[in-house]
Image: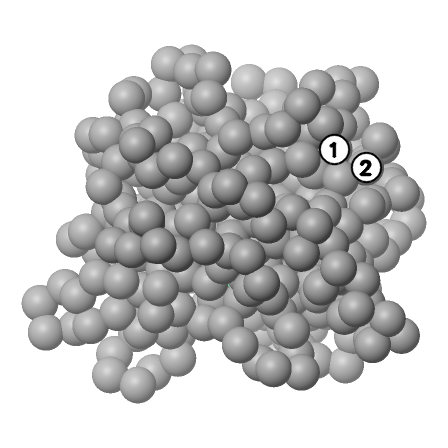
């Protein structure tokens, strides 16, 4: 099965290897935040501003990850970014013990709902997803439930403890909010209108090479599931791939690669948004040093690129290496 998926993915990846988006359209100098290490970007448009929620990398030396709070930045022109500081700390989820991993915020019924992955305490071992709420996009966010929304025990298929990470939330035109998440398996569930409970079954929508970092969006009636993909056979760095569907519940058609890997980073994590009539992909690499700290697995930096759609709804592949923009191609990458 894995072999078939690999062959299918390579086929589709080859099929979309066409001219990349011109970097002349580049909105900001990448990476866009240069005085803090940031990761796992999640954009949200509110009025005339784009808010960007990120993880905060504070790994020291060879430490893999050290993430204790979530940050938010905003912009009105995609060039100047305002740092609003932390919106929440992992310690604010009293049932969590560590790891402020990937998050996303959406607006519903006039409030801002924050979903994030953390490490649960010993009562529900493994990663879990919490939900917090605020009245403004800059917080402060408070735990909205007092317990995890999703625990590792709710998805017994996965045998690893970090299966339940990387929530993405999306409200469809009928007002129903969906949450997708996962590592190795990608899960989908409805949220109740109260935003703090799962409504109905958890289903699996895992696309080819899915590793983590799903992001749901919709454009012109087409649903997109964009995600960090990994060929576990070669164990090369993560890339961004995507799939499309006529409905949130599928069937999902794999569309292959959207980007190669983030420079110097094993992980990459997509976040997509439309702002002022243009679409953007946020991701991360590890291409800055701050003081004597060089970029690393746990010292990443958020980037942004314009997205260009073809008439059939497919997305033109993105070349994200600003330094070698004219020569790099995503052709043949997996
Ligand atoms: O930032 C911690 C983890 O690394 C995220 O949850 C994954 O998506 C990867 O970026």
Q: In the rendered image, which quarter is residue 27 located in?
A: top left
Q: Residue at x 82, y 75 (%)?
A: 2
Foreground residue among 1 and 96 = 1
Identify the coloring: one colour
Query: In the drawing, what numbered circle is on residue 223?
Result: 1
Q: Is residue 264 above or below residue 37?
A: below
Q: In the rendered image, which quarter is residue 288 located in?
A: bottom left
Query: In the drawing, what numbered circle is on residue 43?
Result: none
Query: In the drawing, what numbered circle is on residue 245?
Result: 2
Q: Is residue 220 left or right of residue 36?
A: right
User: Do tag 1 and tag 2 residues touch (Cβ < 8 Å)?
Assistant: yes
Q: Is residue 205 above or below residue 134?
A: below
x and y percentages locating residue 42 in the rendered image: 47, 42
Disc 1 from disc 2: Cα separation: 5 Å
Quadrant that contains the N terminus: bottom right
x and y percentages locating residue 272 in the rendered image: 53, 37
x and y percentages locating residue 246 in the rendered image: 84, 31
């Amino acid at each position: 099965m894995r072999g078939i998926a690999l062959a299918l993915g390579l086929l589709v990846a080859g099929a979309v290897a066409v001219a990349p988006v011109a970097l002349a359209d580049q909105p900001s100098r990448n990476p866009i935040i240069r005085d803090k290490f940031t990761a796992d970007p999640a954009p949200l448009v509110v009025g005339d501003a784009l808010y960007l929620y990120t993880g905060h990398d504070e790994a020291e030396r060879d430490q893999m990850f050290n993430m204790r709070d979530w940050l938010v930045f905003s912009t009105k022109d995609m060039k100047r970014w305002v740092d609003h500081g932390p919106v929440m700390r992992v310690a604010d989820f009293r049932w969590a013990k560590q790891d402020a991993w990937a998050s996303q915020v959406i607006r519903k019924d006039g409030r801002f709902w924050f979903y994030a992955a953390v490490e649960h305490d010993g009562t529900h071992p493994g990663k879990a997803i919490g939900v917090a709420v605020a009245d403004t996009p800059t917080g402060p966010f408070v735990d909205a439930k007092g317990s995890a929304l999703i625990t590792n025990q709710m998805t017994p298929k996965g045998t690893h403890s970090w299966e339940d990470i990387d929530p993405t939330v999306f409200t469809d035109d009928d007002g129903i909010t969906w949450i997708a998440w996962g590592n190795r398996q990608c899960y989908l569930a409805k949220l109740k209108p109260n935003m703090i409970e799962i409504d109905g079954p958890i289903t699996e929508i895992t696309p080819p090479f899915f590793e983590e970092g799903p992001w749901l969006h919709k454009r012109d009636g087409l649903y997109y599931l964009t995600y960090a993909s990994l060929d576990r056979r070669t164990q090369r760095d993560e890339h961004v791939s995507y799939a499309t569907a006529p409905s949130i519940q599928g069937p999902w058609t794999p569309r292959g690669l959207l980007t190669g890997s983030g420079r110097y980073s094993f992980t990459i994590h997509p976040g997509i948004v439309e702002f002022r009539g243009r679409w953007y992909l946020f991701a991360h690499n590890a291409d800055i040093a701050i003081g004597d700290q060089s970029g690393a697995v746990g010292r990443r930096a958020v980037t942004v690129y314009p997205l260009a759609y073809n008439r059939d709804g497919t997305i033109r592949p993105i070349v994200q290496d600003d330094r070698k923009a004219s020569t790099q191609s995503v052709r043949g990458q997996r």
